[in-house]
Image (tube, rainbow, N blue to C red):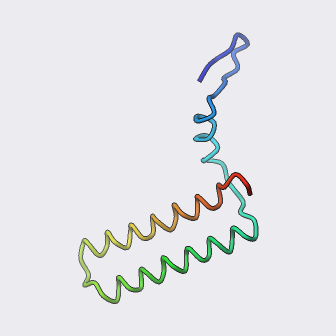
Amino acid sequence: MEIDREGTVNFSRDEQDIINSFDPHIPNEEQVQRILNVRFICRSAAVGVIANVRPSADRTAALRKLHEAMMTANKAIANEKDA
C-alpha cells in the first residue's frame, strides 16, 4: 500500500485482490449450476458420514470440514475472474 502526494491510497494487486474478495459476487447461470453440483456432492458426503460414523467430536469435525469445503469451493466458483 502506498499513499501518494494527494493522499490517495494505492493498493498492490495482491492487496486489491484481498479487498475485492470481500465484495459480493453474483454468479452467472453456469456458475450457479457448478455451485449446486458442489453442494450436492458435499451433502452426499455428509449423509455418508452421518450414516456411518457414530456421534462424536470427530464426526462433528468431519461435518464442519465438509461444510467449510463446500463454502470455500463455492466462493472460488463465484469469485472466478472470467465471470
Q: Nearer the viewer, residue 6 or 12?
A: 12
Image: 25 above or below 66: above
Residue 68, quarter of the rendered image:
bottom left
Residue shown at the point (51%, 79%) measured from the top left: 41
> How many numbered markers are drawn?
0
Q: Please, which residue is most extreme toward the bottom here? A: 51
Where residue 28 sits, quadrant-wise, is bottom right
Residue 12 higher or lower than 47, as above or below: above
The quadrant where residue 75 appears: bottom right
Q: Nearer the viewer, residue 44 or 26?
A: 44
Residue lying furthest front? 82
Q: Position of residue 62 (x, y in %)?
A: 34, 71
Residue in front for this viewpoint, 82 or 65:
82
Work out which quarter of the rendered image holds the N terminus and state it: top right
Left or right, 45 with reference to 30: left
Point 66% across, 48% down: residue: 23
Q: Return the residue found at the far top.
A: 5
Quadrant for the C terminus in the image: bottom right
Residue pictured at 68% horizontal, 14% vertical: 4
Query: How far from the left and from the top, in percent, is residue 55?
Result: 26, 81
Q: Position of residue 72 (x, y in %)?
A: 51, 60
